[in-house]
Amino acid sequence: MSSKKKENKDFQPITDIDRIIHEPARLMILAFLYVVERADFIFLMRQTNLTKGNLSSHLSKLEAAGYIDIEKKFVSKIPRTLLRLTKRGRKAFQIYRQNMKNVFENLPE
Amino acid sequence: MSSKKKENKDFQPITDIDRIIHEPARLMILAFLYVVERADFIFLMRQTNLTKGNLSSHLSKLEAAGYIDIEKKFVSKIPRTLLRLTKRGRKAFQIYRQNMKNVFENLPE
DNA sequence: ACAGACAAGTTTGTGGTACAAACCTATCTG
DNA sequence: CAGATAGGTTTGTACCACAAACTTGTCTGT
């Protein structure tokens, strides 16, 4: 009945924080994709002010986590990279959001 | 009138995120100190489930940032390390909190 | 009174990662 | 056909979170 371990329910939301999402650059990316549901590389780069290189590697990481799909098309010889949130990504983002909300919820002021 | 640079007001709160606070372990520490206003090392260690080593280094970092005061007392030969939020720390935490709130504020669902 | 055992921290070592800079490949332009 | 530009990817590096080792001091038991 009594738990041996102090599990500290208070801080559980913080302990559980998804580090993939927690990184500010990726949080920006996800927050954007959460709304528009589809965007291309260049547009995202302008929106986030990330460099090409960094945007690229963050996108790879998000893809590896299964949070976004990366679709490479050609529009009359010009490459176009389209990004969209997966179901999994959407879910993870919602959970992250709820966790962060819980952290601050019961604080005064 | 028109701004040359795309400043992306939408994501400004994320760009401005305070990395000292953003780290989950330190967020936990600050969230706790925000409430109790004074705690000792051991108690904080139990609350956060951090090891002594990691707690120590996070506290050092918070102190270096001017966010907490570390007070080392002796209570009849036994050392006691007391932590409390500085005004600066309290302010920074509030700003961080507001930034995070802004990030999620205008999203659907 | 002195050999452990324990308590309360601090310092050191290391693997992972965010950011920047270099690189790549293809198209357009004079 | 020599740059310049566009759209990315890969590489290099400096930092930093976490774990493990170390430190300093107190409290036993014998």
Image (cartoon, coloured by chain):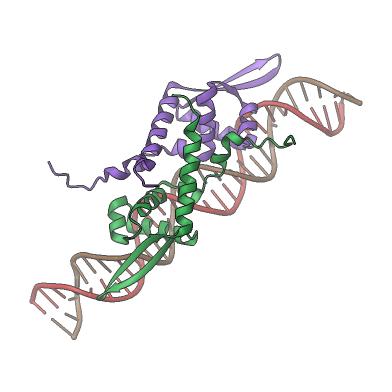
Chain colours: A purple, B green, C brown, D red
* Residue A76 position within the rendered picture, expressed as x and y whole percent measured from the top left: 71, 13
Tell me, yes or no, if residue B18 can be seen here. yes
Q: Which is more toward the observer, A33 or B10?
A: B10
Residue B49 appears in view = no
Quadrant, the N terminus of chain B: top right
Indicate the position of residue D8 as horizontal and vertical percent values. Answer: 63, 29
* Residue at the far front in the pictured view: A109
Q: How many marks?
A: 0
| Residue B80 location, quadrant | bottom left
- What residue lies at 52% left-to-right and 35% top-to-bottom? A26
Give the image location of residue B22, x and y in percent.
46, 46
Q: Is residue A74 left or right of residue C15?
A: right
Camera-nearest residue between B16 and B106: B106
Left or right: C18, with B24 as reference point: right
Q: Nearer the viewer, residue C25 or A21?
A: A21
Q: Give the image location of residue C16, x and y in percent.
A: 46, 43
Q: Residue furthest top?
A: A76
Tell me if B28 is positioned left or right of B76 in this view: right
Q: Is residue D23 above or below residue B42?
A: below
Query: Which picture quadrant has residue A56?
Result: top right
Q: Is residue B8 above or below residue A71?
A: below
Image quadrant where one finds the C terminus of chain B: top left
State the residue at coordinates (31%, 56%): B44
Q: Residue at x 47, y 40 (%)?
A: B100
**Residue sitting at 70 percent across and 19 percent down?**
A78
